[in-house]
Structures are given as C-alpha cells and as structure tokens.
Image: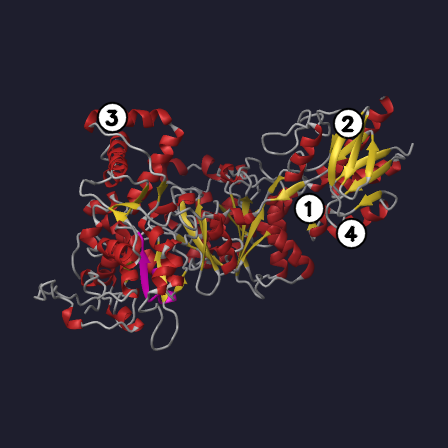
Amino acid sequence: MKENIVIIGGGIAGMEAAKQLLILGYTPIIIEQEDHLGGHVAQWHKLFPDMTSSHELIGNLSDQIKDANVFLETKVNSINALGDSYNVILNNGVNIVAKAILIAAGFHLFDAAKKEEYGYGVYDRVITNADLEAWFNHRADERIPEKPKAVGFVHCVGSRDLKAGNSQCSKVCCTTAIKQAIEIKEIFPETEVYCFYMDLRLFGKKYEDFYINAQRDFGVHFIRGRVSEVGETIDNRVQVKAEDTLTGKPLKVTLDLLVLMSGMVCNPRTSELAGMIGLNIDDDGFLKSKDNVYTIMESNQPGIFYAGACTGTKTVPETVAEARAAVLSIHHYLTQA
Amino acid sequence: MMDFGFTLSKSSTINLDTVDTTLYKKLCDMEPDARICMSCGSCSASCTAASFSGMSLRKVILALQRDQDVRPMLANCMLCGKCTMVCPRAINTRHLILTLYRIYDR
Amino acid sequence: MITQGKQKIWSDYQKEIPDDHWYYVRSCIRQNFFPASEKMFTEITRNVLGKDIYETPHHTTCGGIAYHCDTIPQETVMTIVARQFALMTEAGYENYVPSCITSFGNYCEILETWHEFPELEAKIRENLWKACRREFNKPKYLAHTSDLIYHWRNQIAAKAKYHLVNKETGEPLKIVEHIGCHYAKMFPSKGVGGAEYPYVLAGMIESWGGQVVDYPERRHCCGYGFRQYHVKANRGYSVSNTHKKFESMEPFHPDAIITNCPGCPYFLDRWQYVIAEQTGKTYGKDGYGIPVLTYEELAGIVLGYDPWDLGLQLHQVAVEPLLDKIGMEYDPKAKYLGLNKEDILRPELPKSIKCC
C-alpha cells in the first residue's frame, strides 16, 4: 500500500496511530513542533491508575514506530485541497501529498498564572501538577522544600471555570491529584496532605479505589471547597483560604507547598489548522467532531480525522483507544474510496 | 476596659494549623475505616436520632477533624445500627460509635 | 516572593494616565478624617509639579455612600454623576480625577453600565436635562488621585527631602500598602497593577525608598463596609476585620501603613486604639501603634512639609516614631498649635496605646 498519511502532532495519540498505520502497511508521517516525541506524557513521571512509567510507555512506542517518518521541530504552514488529496506544506519547505490527515495536536496545559489569586509565579511555594511530575523525574526544584510539613493540592485550576474561559472538566486532574498526593505521602510519610476539591470525579476503572487508598492507607485529607485565595507568610510558606463546605465554615491552613492542578485547555495551534481547511471549532475551543457519541474521530471534511485531546479533554487510555479507532476509520475511508 | 457598646467578634474560621486532631487520630488508630468516610450523608439520612436531636455520624467524623465537641451529638445515638446497613463504604458505624464512647470514657 | 512574577502582572495592568489637565473632585469625608490630604494633593500637583488641576465649588457628593448603604436607587446616583460630568464638560476638561475610592468605583461602574446599556445612558441624559438643563460628555480618561501621584511618583522622588529609609540603620522602611476595595476589586483592569497585586501604592513606596510588605491578609477589606460601621451594633464585626489584618501583618513589623481610600486609613488608625482597649495589644514598637497615612500625607512627608501642616496631629496612632526613623525635623511642641500658633487644646491620651 505505502500510502502517505500525515499525522499532525507526535504525542501519545500520534505515536499510537503511527504504530497502527505501520501495521496496516501505510506510511505515516509525523509532524511534531517540539524537538521530541511523546507530548505531555513524555514530561510526566507515572500514569494512574497502575503507576505505569510514562518513559517506558513512550520508549516502547518510539521503538515500535522507528519506520515512521518523523519531522521534529516542524510546523504545518498550510494545507490545500488537491482533488481527493491534500497538499501539506511544512515550514521546512517539504511538501507532502496525502489522501488522509490525522490531527492529533493535543491540548495545552492551562497557564496557572492566569489565576492570579493563587500566586503561581509570584509565591515561592506554589507549583503546578506538571512541575511536580518534573520534580518526580529529576528531583530538582527549589520551590519544593526538603521536609514539607504540609502540602496542598488545588483541584480544577482553570477547569470548570467560566471566568477563565473554560467550562469543561479536565477529567484527569482529580485522579492525578490523588496519585500525586499518594506519591508525596510515600516520599514524605510525616507530611499532612490536603486535597481541595469541588467534586471528586473518579469515573474510570480503579480510580475510586485510588481514592479509598489515599484516604485509608495514606491519610490524605479531602476538603470540599475551592481555594479562593493564597498569600505568603513571613517564612515564605503559603496561607490558603477555602470554605470547608461540609461544615459551612471558612477554613485556612498554612502549607509548605501548594500544587495547582492545571487543567486541559484547547491548543491554540488547532484553530490555526482548522482555519487552513475549514474545520469546525466547538464552543470550548477544541476541534468539533461530527458528533460526540459515535464519530468523535471524524471531522466535517473528507479525509481529515481526529485523535486524542484535540477534540476535548481525554485520559491516556481514551486517547490511545481513539488513535486506534481513528486509524481504522482512515483505513475504511481509503479502502472504500 | 472602656465600654464601646461593641466588642471584637470571635472568628468562625477553622484554622488547620492549630486544630487539635488527637481524638480523631486516636479514633483512626482504633477504627481505621473512619478515614474512608466520604461524607455522603446516608448514615444521617437514615438515623433514628437525626430528625429529633441533630445527631449525624457524618458530622461527627468531620467535627473530630475540626476539633469540635461531638459528645452532645453522640449522646443521642440509639445504637439501632441502621447507619451500618446503609454505609456504602461498609464502615462498621455502630462499632465506630461505641469506640468513640470508649475513647471519651477514658 | 518572586518579584519578576509580580512585575509581569503589573505590566499586564497598566492604564493610560494623561500627564496634565485634570478636573478634580473631592471626597465627602476625607476632609473631616485627614483634613490636609486633599489640600496636599492640590499643593503638590499645582505648586510642586506645576500641573493644571481644576476644581469647582459646585461639585457635590457622587452618591456613592448612599448607594453602597442601599438607601438610594442607582438611577438617582447616575443622574448625580451625570451632573458632575456636566460640570467637567462646562469647565472644558475631559480628564476626571476623584479623590475618593468609592467615587472612583462608582464612576467606573456607571461608565461600564452605560457602555453595556446605552439606552440607560440616554435615559440619564434625559433625567439630567429635565432636572437642571445640563448636558455632558463622558470623561475621556478616568483616574483616581492615587493613580496621578503614582504617575508622578518619580518626579516627587526627584524633589524628595526625606526617603523612606531608617536614618540610623540605612535600611528601607517596611511599609504596608492597603488598597480600597472599590479601587480595583470591581474592575481589575481599571487599577494600576490589577486587583490581586495592585501596584499603585507599591510603586510610590518603592520610588520613595521604602520596602513593600506583602502579608497573607493584604487583600482583606479594612472592615469599614459602610453599613457595617454606620450601625453601631455592627461595629464589633467591622473592628474584627481590622484586627484580622493587624494579626496577619504583625510578624512583618511594618513601620507604617499607607492607603488610598477615605475609610481605610480612618479605621486602620482609629481601630488600633479600640483593639488596644479591648485586647491590651498594640502592634508598633514599645506600646505604640503602626502609623497609618494617606498617600498624600506620605508624599508630603517625603517632600519635607511640616508634619503639623499635614494634619498628622489628627491621627489616633502617633506618627512621631515614623518621623524619627526617617530623621524628619519637626517641633514636637508645635503639634497642637493652630494656624495662628495658638494652642488648639490637647486630646486626652489613652493609656492602652502609647501616643504623643
């Protein structure tokens, strides 16, 4: 067959799709704007609920797609329809003609500094979920004290927040917060850990067990109330305010580290791509699928398919499953045409 | 002291820095399942004493973590055991209440 | 504290402040609370900086206090404000600068409301015409007087006689900045530096040699809250909020507090006495309180005006420890002499908080 398939985005969705396309005998071409494959997952340490090593996962996938063509540090300049194909022009001067394009451009992590009241980038002891994963990987971050007495996690940072422009739930943060809370307890067993949540959305397999585990075996405290304001104390710790909604009283606590669970927001690159070929954008800024039940992988243009978080917030298993589904859709599209 | 006709109000804020959780920790040592309460409220909804006395096991478990006196609530429990039947986290609530009596007796 | 992080936010919230020709309106209550502050504003801006600051005796209340006490409909407030704008228009000005934070908030809110609901603006124009046959242009620029002092802070620094530095140790003085709630909490984009990390007063402190204190309850309201203080039964609640702020700033040992609102300096100053009476606690050194100043008073001190001409003898908390720290020359005996150098009588000094 050896038909070209352009994959825009070399994260977990793009990599899994490339792997499946290779198996089916196609020639996948991955366009990735960063200097490495793996996207957000490559920056992570371990994945819930099995504490899978993200490096092993990305490493294994990389080995399996060695035969794919990969353009790193490359962007798509334009896409033009050319009969029943598309001419994809890259910023390195390369032109690719392909009958099918898979958009797997992923998401952006919400910029936590936008929630000014939390003091990310202002207070010494405020970090994000991504910063904490980086610390799990490299153990180098001046903001993380040697022996924290108390650590807090703020759920829904930039998610479910109309004022931040995002009505969507980011799906992964509740479970990630619990995972990270457990990891903190494993490293610092004496530390008091608090999770500030509005709802706990633990919908996936094993997620609720994770929650019970955090409560029973690690004594993580769950406080139902959104953090409203953070201030810095004289000893560079942070004072956090929330309502303890279950007692109906305001609550405050001083912490040595505050972790903001930055949510998933749409990747602004995708709207540029959408503009090139007339793809529909949903009101949450993500790419709009044909529908949200049965044909999430399909766009409003023939030959353009979606996989992963470019259409909305997704977990890793959902993204991988969608990448495989999208490959099948592409295969059917090309073989039936 | 000068009488101004008004005085400083007491703050209702729960300060987790200073809250004394000794009793709660003791309860968790003796009754580890206390930790897995998720505040669903089904114990209170089915409680014989709740509608007449303000007893709520959900509130008792939370109040212990906020260093509030739970004895007035506990005193109204009839030990009927209905809360144990409804608890989705399978906490032996009746046993937990008896453990609390024991802790307070000491 | 990561200074660059704050600087990034400050750069996001800058507003255009024209350098001259302002139509100035006073506050209802500031001249009673801190009588020389508004006088200092006109003195510094006109005579030291040479700016054109116009005011008219025809200006009245903006209606803001009544509005925030729920005793007046918003349409009435809007018509009062429309009349102020008409006076500005008649005087040939287009830059409007109120001295009161609640007025500033009130003007921001009304201009924003008219922007969203033009039919309401049309109705108010009709109301004003019916009531007093006046017409108005909306201000081209709206700023608070603290915005202007912020805008000219470096010019003031260039003429400074004293700096916010401890003369003995050479260390910068630690200054708490307190922003009136109605300055930027309603419209963060209208305040210099935004609402979470306002820069308007912090900029003055830095420019005049001091060090800004950021403490956990910095954003907390002073507790005035209009209705809360005006009803005597609620005053315990009002003073409790002030108490909360002092408890939070205590570990930082501030040398002074500056504010940009009519009510805040009054309550942060006077309540220190009430707190001392009720709890026996004072927050300054050696039984003194923490001096609380308006930004005009602070500018006056920096420029070397006589503290008694600045009206500092009307403060509850003694300001002398602050004046001594910066090495200001003043005559302690002249504190209670009036303009004619005759004794204006002395207040009874409390025992709970040390005063001079």
Q: Chain of mark 3?
A: C
Q: Secondary structure at mark 3?
A: helix
Measure the alpha-carbon separation of dots 2 and 4: 38 Å
Q: Report x, y in % for residue A191.
A: 55, 60
C61 in magenta: no
Q: Chain of mark 4?
A: A
| Same chain assignment for discs 1 and 3 | no
* Range of magenta residues: C247-260
Question: Image check: C123 left or right of B45?
Answer: left
Q: Amino acid at mark 1?
A: Pro
Closer to the observer: label 1 or label 4? 4
Q: Which residue is mark 1?
A: A49
Q: Residue furthest bottom?
A: C168
Question: Image check: B9 left or right of A267?
Answer: left
Closer to the observer: label 2 or label 4? 2
Measure the alpha-carbon separation of dots 1 and 4: 15 Å
Of the two numbered discs 1 and 4 on the same chain, state the one appearing first in sequence.
1
Q: Are marks 2 and 4 in contact (CB under 8 Å)?
A: no
Measure the alpha-carbon separation of dots 3 and 4: 73 Å
Q: Secondary structure at mark 4?
A: helix
| Same chain assignment for discs 2 and 3 | no
Q: Nearer the viewer, residue A218 or C237?
A: C237
Which of the 4 image quadrants contains residue C303? bottom left
Q: Report x, y in % for residue A334.
A: 85, 26
Q: Report x, y in % for residue A193.
A: 54, 55
Quadrant holding the N terminus of chain B: bottom left
Q: Which residue is mark 3?
A: C127
